[in-house]
Amino acid sequence: MVTSEQHPAGSQAVDRALSILEILARRGESSVGAVAVELGVHKSTASRLLAALERHGLVVQSEWRGTYQLGFGLIRLAGATTAPSSVSRELQSICDTLAQSLNDTVNVAILDELACINVVQAMGRASVAAVKEYVGRRTPLHATSSGKVLLAYAPPEIREKVLSLPLAAFTDRTIGSPSVLRAALDQVLDQGWATNDEQWERDTSAVAVPVRSLRGDVVAALSVTGPSTRINPPRFADIASRLQAGAATMSAHVEFLASLR
């Protein structure tokens, strides 16, 4: 016999899904098991509800911790009523132009505690259908170009916190040593841009630059991601220069990004 516990439907499922959002808002993050206990349901039920919320970007799963937390999709929904639509359109337009020029995927990311979260994305002409959707996705600071930019310019306490934690390996090129990461962050500050040479995903590389407010504060990272055959060390400096031009244009519109932090 199939019970409502096995296949929650209708108002009961909606009520439980909303309760999950409230749980994550209160706790910050939680495992499937902990959510199930608090809801008083089987773990499989909690897992299905979380998966449904994740499909809509309302929750995201940490790929290196296995826990869930609120997703950027909630901010996008709130933005429909509270964010300056002209500003968000302008940021998207800048990214679209860069993506078409660079032929690869352009992202804007902001710092989200000890990770970064992508908030704007544009696909280039060379991007293939299999390119992942990065908006709302939290990625590690030490293994991505955007993460390194945000970490390099982050408050000292955040930088030191990340350097004190185990650095998860995602490929054989991921930085696993705090001293190597510290040196890489110092290099970011010296040259004004960061790279990810297959450190997050195999055969994929990226370059990122800081996006500053008109006061000079770094509030986001602007990056381009693509196959390592196109984005590679000989091209890093040139790509960074082109991104910096886009970031400078974006500076007049980033108060919206700062409000999301």
Image (cartoon, rainbow, N blue to C red):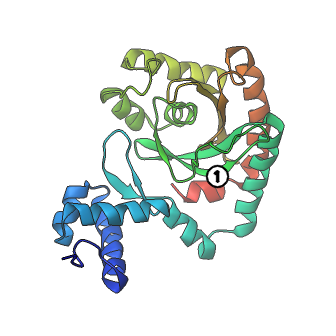
User: Between residues 123 and 118, which one lies in front from this camera angle?
Assistant: 123
Please provide percent x and percent y for residue 67. Answer: 30, 50
Q: Is residue 12 above or below residue 257?
A: below
| Residue count near mark 1 (Cα–Cα under 10 Å), binned few <14, some 14–19, many ≥20 | many
The secondary element bearing badge 1 is classed as strand
Q: Up-down: is 120 above or below 199?
A: below
Q: Is residue 45 above or below residue 32?
A: below
Q: Nearer the viewer, residue 161 or 136?
A: 136
Residue 182 vs residue 88, the one in the foreground: 88
**In percent of the image, x 32 and y 80: which residue is there?**
15
At 42% from the left and 28% from the top, the residue drawn is 170
Q: What amino acid type is highlighted by mark number 1?
A: Val
Relative placement, left or right, of 156 versus 201 is left
- Looking at the image, residue 197 sits to the left or right of residue 51; the answer is right
Residue closer to the observer: 23 or 7: 7
What x and y, as percent, mark residue 212? 66, 43
Task: Determine whether 212 is above or below 242 in the image.
Answer: below
Q: Determine the residue positioned at 63% across, 29% down.
A: 206
Tally of marks: 1
* Quadrant into which the N terminus falls: bottom left
Residue 180 location in percent, x, y?
Answer: 44, 15
Rendering quarter of residue 88: bottom right
Q: Of all residues shown, which one is farthest toward the bottom? A: 11
**Which x, y percent locates residue 166?**
30, 27
**Tag 1 residue:** 120
